[in-house]
Amino acid sequence: MAPAFKYVPFYTEVFFECLEKHRDKQNRILELVERICENPKVRPSHFLGFKKGIDLRGKRRRHMSGNYVIIYIVCEECISLGHKTKGYNNCHFCSNKQPNWIIFVAFDKWDDIYSKNWPISRPDFTQ
Ligand SMILES: [Zn+2]
């Protein structure tokens, strides 16, 4: 039976670059994306804070085997937790009208993923 509320994935340009860079991980990542879309706000995901001086507040991370980490934003939380107001994700486009989007920001090895504040390209909410 289909869940009552299904999240819809949006991929940033950076995320596509990550998929390209780690072609051997593509299938596993897309499986994980599926699972996150079913239940994005539960453990084992965690909110990020400052990492190595980089402000990653408002974003969630989830670990994957092989020391990989995937970073995503639950748009609904930008509104409900005030992340948009605080400017955490620089996501002026988030609104209550599209509460079911998840923006998949990036994934990479544990050592590399926290090296910068990944740009968030704008989802096309008209889709
Ligand atoms: Zn947002």
Image (cartoon, helix red, strand yellow):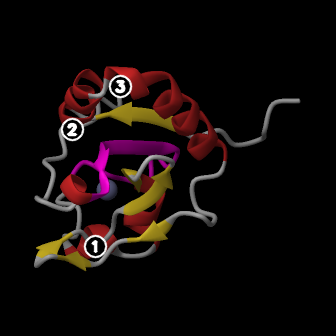
Image quadrant where residue 60 sits: bottom left
Residue designated by label 1: 57
Q: Amino acid at mark 1?
A: Arg
Question: Over which residues does the magenta segment extend?
Answer: 92-110
Q: Nearer the viewer, residue 107 or 42?
A: 107
Q: Quadrant of the N terminus?
A: top right
Q: Amino acid at mark 2?
A: Arg
Mark 1 / mark 2, whichever is N-terminal:
1
**Residue 50, image x and y in percent?**
22, 79
Quarter of the render that holds ligand 1 = bottom left
Say if mark 1 contacts mark 2, CB within 8 Å.
Answer: no
Q: Nearer the viewer, residue 47 or 109?
A: 109
Any part of residue 127 in sight: no
Q: Residue at x 52, y 44 (%)?
A: 100
Image quadrant where residue 31 sits: top right
Q: Mark 1 and mark 3: span between their CA atoms?
A: 27 Å
Q: Residue at x 28, y 73 (%)?
A: 57
Residue designated by label 3: 126
Q: Nearer the viewer, mark 1 or mark 2?
A: 1
Any part of residue 104 in sight: yes
Q: Residue at x 81, y 30 (%)?
A: 2
**Residue 67, image x and y in percent?**
40, 53
Q: In the visual, does 50 lie left or right of 68? A: left
Say if mark 2 contacts mark 3, CB within 8 Å.
Answer: no
